[in-house]
Image (tube, rainbow, N blue to C red):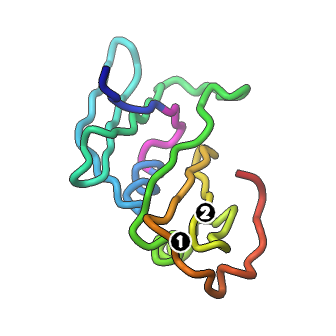
Amino acid sequence: MKYLHTMIRVTDPDATVRFFELLGLREVRRFDNEKGRFTLIFLAAPGNEDAQVELTHNWDPEDYDGGRNFGHLAYQVENIYETCQRLMDAGVTINRPPRDGHMAFVRTPDNISIELLQDGHLAPAEPWASMPNTGVW
């Protein structure tokens, strides 16, 4: 058995691709299906192309309630503070700041939770250590 990808449904593929690019992922392939009226976009972290995220964009508008769009994705990062700062600088809300130097949560433009986990452990540092949660994750 081999892991292939995780799929999430998205309403704005351009905004979602930009979000994942901020995390460090890159588009590895794209497939438009005119007859089925959908686009599949596959992204992966450089050097880790076997672990992919499939963004599914159905061309006809549809509400994704009841968990049809997904739960959360988790990514290990080299420096959680630098990653969160880069995301904040781009206007992304840090829903659960990395107060412990180990874990944070953010959300995609479609409200999919992304868990960021520090590779190893960093000591708690400001402003993160005293930053409150924002919303839910």
Q: CA separation, marks 2 and 1?
A: 8 Å
* Residue 50: quadrant of the picture: top left
Residues tagged 2 and 1 counted as in contact (Cβ below 8 A): yes
In percent of width and height, residue 66 lies at: 73, 26
The earlier-in-sequence mark between 2 and 1 is 1
**135 versus 79 height, above or below:** above
As drawn, the label of residue 84 is 1
How packed is label 1: few (under 14 Cα within 10 Å), some, or many (20 or more)? many
* Mark 2 or 1: the one toward you: 2
Left or right for 58, reference 34:
right
* Residue 3: quadrant of the picture: top left
Specify start and end residues of the magenta stretch as a single range.
8-14
Tell me the residue at 30%/52% (across/down): 45
Tell me the residue at 41%/56% (across/down): 18
Q: Residue furthest bottom?
A: 126
As drawn, the label of residue 104 is 2
Label 2 residue SS: strand
Left or right for 18, reference 123:
left
Q: Nearer the viewer, residue 34 or 89?
A: 89
